[in-house]
Amino acid sequence: MSVDSLVVVEVDHGFGWEELLPPYGRCHACDGEGRLDGPCPGCDGSGQVRQWPWHDSTHELSFILSGIRFRPEISSPPFPPPIAAVRGLPADLSASARHQFDRLAAAIASWGRQAYLHGLTWLFVKEVLEYDWTRPEDGADHQSDTLADAHRMFLDGVTQLGQRFPPTATRLVLAFYE
Ligand SMILES: [Zn+2]
């Protein structure tokens, strides 16, 4: 079970928040083929889309990042505590990020009753990296072996961001929907 998410990364180099563009990766809609019945609308036929590798989140990871229980019947196991309670969008969001969240909200509205925007939040990279990602069942020495794949992929990506940019001036802005 997964939760769809939109992740925008922003960096403040001292002149306000700017979006950091994600790398190109394989389009999931067409599996990189570029075609469905016709040219793939997800990637305009290129087979490649810009996206962070952690766009497909588990319920547990989504809860850690946002504090939102997406579905009580699924989210009932005792999840680790969230990094922070849900915060909404930052007031000083960059224009390009604002555009993406506006577009997502419009898309969700057009999808009808089945679609739902669970919440919007943001986190500094520093907060993500300082969180205790060790799981109760993990031995202290075996964290990297037993951390769930989705968590490890997310944490690896954020760790790389924190190595390239100041963790207190880099933030993830997140929307969770389905
Ligand atoms: Zn595609």
Image (cartoon, grey):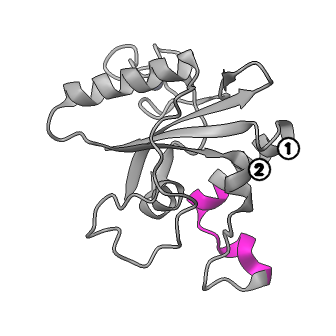
In which quadrant is the C terminus drawn? top left
Q: Secondary structure at mark 1?
A: helix
Q: Which residue is mark 1?
A: 163
Q: Magenta segment, which residues?
A: 141-153
Task: Report the Cα–Cα distance between label 1 and label 2.
Answer: 6 Å
Q: Position of residue 69 (x, y in %)?
A: 35, 62
Which residue is found at the position 58% from the left and 21% from the top? 94
Q: Nearer the viewer, residue 163 or 144?
A: 163
118 above or below 92? below
170 above or below 75? above
Which residue is found at the position 63% from the left and 52% from the top? 154
Q: Nearer the viewer, residue 38 or 127?
A: 127
Q: Which mark is residue 159?
A: 2
Q: Position of residue 138 (x, y in %)?
A: 66, 83
Which residue is found at the position 41% from the left and 20% from the top? 35
Q: Is residue 164 visible?
A: yes
